[in-house]
Image: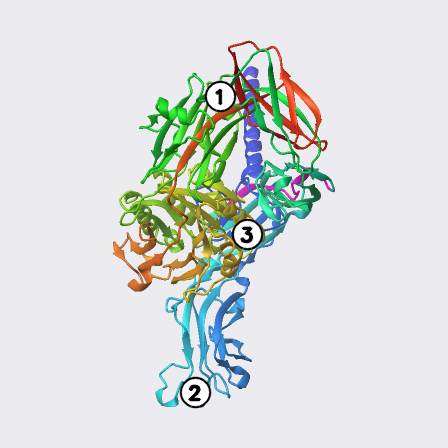
Amino acid sequence: MNTQHIRTGQKLMITLAVICSVITLVWLVRWTVFDKPGVRQLSAEDTSFSLSLDDGDFVQGSKTILATASSAEQEMELLIDGIKAPLKPVMEQQALLTLEVSDLESGNGYVNAVWFNGARIHTFNENMTTFTKVLIPVPADLLKPGENEVIMRSGSTVSPEDEAMEHDDWRFRSLKFELGDGTVLEAPAYNTSTTYVVGDGSPSSRLPNSLEKRFTFTIKDEKFRAYYHIWDTRQLPEGAHQVELIADEPTGKKSKAVTVQVDNTAPSVQIVSPAEGNTYKNSVNISLKVNDAGSGTADTVVKLDGKVIVLPEEVLTEKLTAGAHKLEVMTSDKAGNETEAAVSFQVIDEMPKPPLAVHPADLSVVDADRTELSVQVSDTADDALDVSFYKARRFDLGQAVAHAAFSHAADREPPLQMVLDGENALSAAERSLVASRDGQYLVNNDKERFPYHRFSIEVGDNLTGDDEVVWSGHSLPERLVTMYLWNHDKSVWEDMDSNKGTEDFTLHGKLSPPFIRNGRVEVLIQDRIPTAEDYDFAFLWMSDTQYYAEKYPNIFDRMIEWAVANWKQRKLSYLIHTGDIVNNWNSKEEWERASGSMRNLDDAGIPYGVVAGNHDVAYDAGIYDDYWKYFGRDRFIGQPTFSGDLNNNRDHYDLVSVNGNDFVIIYLGWLIDQKTFDWADAVLKKHADRNAIIATHEYLKPNKAYYGQGQQIWDELVVPNSNVFMVLGGHNPGVAHNVKKIGDRHVLEMLSDYQNGPEGGQGFMRLLQFDLGTSQLFVNTYSPYLNKHNFFKPEDDELVLPITLKPIEKQVATDYIAVYSRTHDLIGEVHEIPSGGTATVAYHGLAPGQTHHWFAVARDQYGGQSRSEVYSFHTK
């Protein structure tokens, strides 16, 4: 054989061997590192089993991980950083039966009892003459998939099974069956508005089965496929960790692996000002440094003397009582870690008053060669004052420059656009009314829309940085006038200052770069006046859509599609959802169905708000992870009505203006803590001029009594805030309403929950229709799915209720509008002027034929100061 051929064959065999080795090595690496033996990665579309964590989630403290199998027989394995973690079945937790009992005489020997699936789980041992809440644990080993039977039975003095002797007659209501994971189950035969009686009554009239009442609750199979692991992350290093769920299925093993971030480090908070123990006079600047290197800060709540304030804030000490004050700061990061800080400080109530008695008078004509400026100054504590005079610039409609001014009316307050079609430019005579402070007013009213004055003021590009818009005028009694500046970066009218009343007041708007574009500042001054027709406008209210998300998504879609299609025809202005959006908080399919249905509102530009119910969060601990993913802040922040939130839309509020009426609608999430109560109270007080509606998940029972935190909401939010006129809630199947009076104020309380009806409620929702002319609210109940009104009796589903809204007669009257630009260019100063004295300086070097602007600042020895308006004079 040819030697060359042998060598060539050897080389070929060696080459093939190397290739095979490389392939084997690559396969082994993939086998060990990426796929693991026999384990197939779960695709995004595969929902055969689920893990409650997603990539990128932040976790802290003791975190409950939930996993759901495709069947009760499926074996699953949980790995955390490659180490096996024990999984326990959810249904190993006991359930809870709750009811209210009355007229019970167990203390007299009657053996009254409750059974569950044939086992006696509770025997009453005392008398209960009035309705008393009773909590009865249900052992986990009695729970079973499918129907579970509960029996309330009246006993004799011998036993609960005896039927021959005299039996007790007792009543019960408010029956509730709750699984260990917080799921509340409903019994189809149970009526939430009924009070049930068990007993023999009179022996001659005993009815069959009158000694007991039976109800069945269906536990779904999937509840027996759910497992949990409580993961203590506090002993782990901060940063990324892998959580993997492996399921053993007939087709082989599948896995879902996610990377989450452990963050157990609370944010840092430094209260820069005020300083602990310091004494302040005139003003207190509140300044914080908040930082979180892990998940990032989520919410910061600041309270001054127990009341929530919004930063940045400079508090004038004249608004505080002299003495001790406390500033508290509570901040949290996105993982849920919280930090609190507090300082105490003292306040001295002293402040120089703004300089007055100005000379020369505004708009005077003076000799250029002998000009003097003077002001009269005074101090609260009679301290001597130093007075400085500075140059300034002023831009107003008294100048022959390209300022523009318009009057008009909008369909809402404020408008969504900077310039609306149909604006009327002010005539020369109208411009003269707002060119100076002279007690002459430009007045605008409108009987249907929201009247406004808009000013476009040319300021050039030489502002000093200490610049503000100043407006003076008035309105009608108790009516609010608001100054808005157009924010070019955000393309919105931004609220700067407000005041109310028939006496003239001044509004100020601090200028910054977003409010200045092409050398111009856009200003809007607005108030509102409504109209009244048969009914003027309506809000749409839905609640407890949980079964639509779970079983009947076509009904959910139909409800939203009807709302979009009938929005204008039905005069709808806003939609409220009071929770239990889904039935199972950890069901991705339900969340995606609900989100998809509600997305039609987003696409149509329809404003709405939602709040979480107990089915939307995990357990009574209130884990909001899935709610945040689908209905967090990011979903709503672009809505024109969205105005603020707490903890990623757990609680939030919307500002709605329609037909001249202003509303603040505040949503309180499941399990309201004191932080939320404080925040909500501050929002209601900040918007005290608006008609307030509180939307929360649970508030009333069908018997009209308060439920859950209902009494606390009434005591802490409704009673002390006179603008609250309506509270809406669901949770308890049924309907109810109260009309309560606090002084002259009507407060409407309503429960609306149709979930116990066929197909989860068959799409019934409520129309809240406002008739301003008669001060009435017309409530109608309608199902677009059935094209039918009323689920319950007409007297329960069709209501005519009194409403007491804030005063609706409105007006905007402008006396003066200007932009002040103050400089640090000193004209002159004088020292130690006694309180009540006059400070005078000479103004040299002025040429004739020019206009000059100036202002004065009065300072005391403690650093307190006040400054005058900007004035002008012309030299001759």
Which badge, 2 or 3, is on the more N-terminal residue?
2
Q: Considering the numbered disc 1 on the image, is that residue within a helix, a strand or a loop?
A: strand
Which badge, 3 or 1, is on the more N-terminal residue?
1
Q: Give the left or right position of residue 835, taking residue 821 as reference.
A: right
Q: Position of residue 144 (x, y in %)?
A: 47, 66
Residue type, label 2: Glu
Query: Can residue 39 be spotted in the picture?
Result: no
Q: Position of residue 412 (x, y in %)?
A: 37, 38
Q: Residue at x 56, y 15 (%)?
A: 4
Q: Considering the numbered disc 3 on the image, is that residue within a helix, a strand or a loop?
A: helix
Q: Give the left or right position of residue 845, taking residue 709 as reference.
A: right
Q: Which label is found at residue 395? A: 1
Residue type, label 1: Phe
Spot the residue most to the left.
Answer: 787
Query: Can residue 703 be spotted in the picture?
Result: yes
Asked if residue 317 is among those painted magenta in the image, a careful observer would answer no
Quarter of the view holding residue 86: bottom right
Q: Which residues are magenta?
A: 255-276
Residue type, label 3: Phe
Q: Which residue in the structure is indicated by mark 2?
A: 163
